[in-house]
Image (spheres, rainbow, N blue to C red):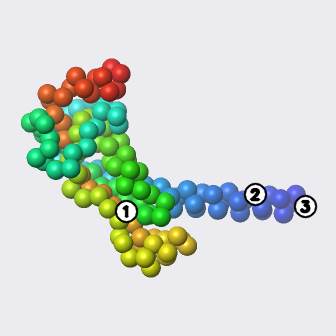
């Protein structure tokens, strides 16, 4: 009886871990300006802009940030939050969105719902640092 109980718990644990892995957002960041050495900020301090024309200050490009997740479990807000977190980790205080969206094929979405990995939501952005925006960053991060 004890053996079957342990096996049941093991199967349940593996199932939960697999579900959490499938639901997660995966991010990647590649530094583009190695000369800049910035202190990390907080996610709340990273403002998102739809394009370069909407950035209110002069800025330096810091890194390229990409994120992806299963579109059944991950929304655009999750992708954006993950990208903002990565940008904050390298000291950026802004994010210029290049792309943010999901595949739209119904068959792919159904496949992802039953465990396939072919319906993804993806985003790509440029992490930026705006020297003139440091007061807002301090206020946002409570520093």
Residue situated in front as seen by the camera: 45 or 36: 45
Question: What percent of the width, then of the height, locates residue 142?
Answer: 35, 22
Question: What percent of the width, then of the height, locates residue 101?
Answer: 32, 62
Question: What percent of the width, then of the height, locates residue 102?
Answer: 35, 65
Quarter holding the C terminus?
top left
Question: What percent of the width, then of the height, locates residue 14?
Answer: 65, 60
Q: CA distance from mark 2 to mark 3?
A: 12 Å
Whichever of callouts 2 and 3 sits on the residue coming sooner in the sequence is 3
Q: Which mark is residue 121?
A: 1
- Per the image, label 1 sits on a secondary structure element best described as strand
Q: Can you name the residue that lies furthest to the right here?
A: 1
Residue at the disc numbered 3: 1
Residue at the disc numbered 2: 9
* 20 w.r.t. 91: above or below: below
Callout 2 touching callout 3 (CB < 8 Å): no
User: Of discs 1 and 3, which sits in the foreground?
Assistant: 1
User: Of discs 1 and 2, which sits in the foreground?
Assistant: 1
Q: Residues within 10 Å of mark 3 (few under 14, many from 20)?
A: few
- Per the image, label 2 sits on a secondary structure element best described as helix
Task: Give me the residue at 34% from left, 26% from top.
Answer: 141
Q: Residues within 10 Å of mark 1 (few under 14, many from 20)?
A: many
Name the quadrant containing residue 46: top left
Task: Give me the residue at 63% from left, 58% from top.
Answer: 16
Whichever of callouts 1 and 3 sits on the residue coming sooner in the sequence is 3
Q: CA distance from mark 1 to mark 2?
A: 32 Å
Quarter holding the N terminus?
bottom right
Q: Is residue 91 visible?
A: yes
Position of 36 with respect to 29 (left or right) is left
């Amino acid at each position: 009886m004890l053996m079957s109980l342990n096996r049941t718990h093991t199967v349940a644990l593996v199932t939960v871990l697999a579900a959490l892995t499938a639901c997660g957002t995966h991010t990647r960041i590649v530094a583009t300006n190695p000369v800049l050495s910035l202190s990390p900020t907080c996610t709340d301090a990273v403002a998102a802009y739809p394009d370069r024309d909407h950035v209110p200050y002069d800025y330096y490009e810091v890194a390229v940030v990409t994120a992806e997740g299963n579109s059944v479990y991950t929304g655009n807000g999750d992708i954006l939050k993950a990208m903002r977190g990565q940008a904050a980790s390298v000291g950026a205080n802004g994010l210029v969105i290049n792309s943010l969206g999901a595949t739209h094929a119904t068959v792919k979405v159904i496949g992802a719902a039953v465990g396939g990995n072919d319906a993804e939501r993806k985003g790509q952005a440029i992490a930026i640092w705006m020297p003139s925006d440091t007061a807002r960053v301090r206020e946002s991060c409570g520093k």
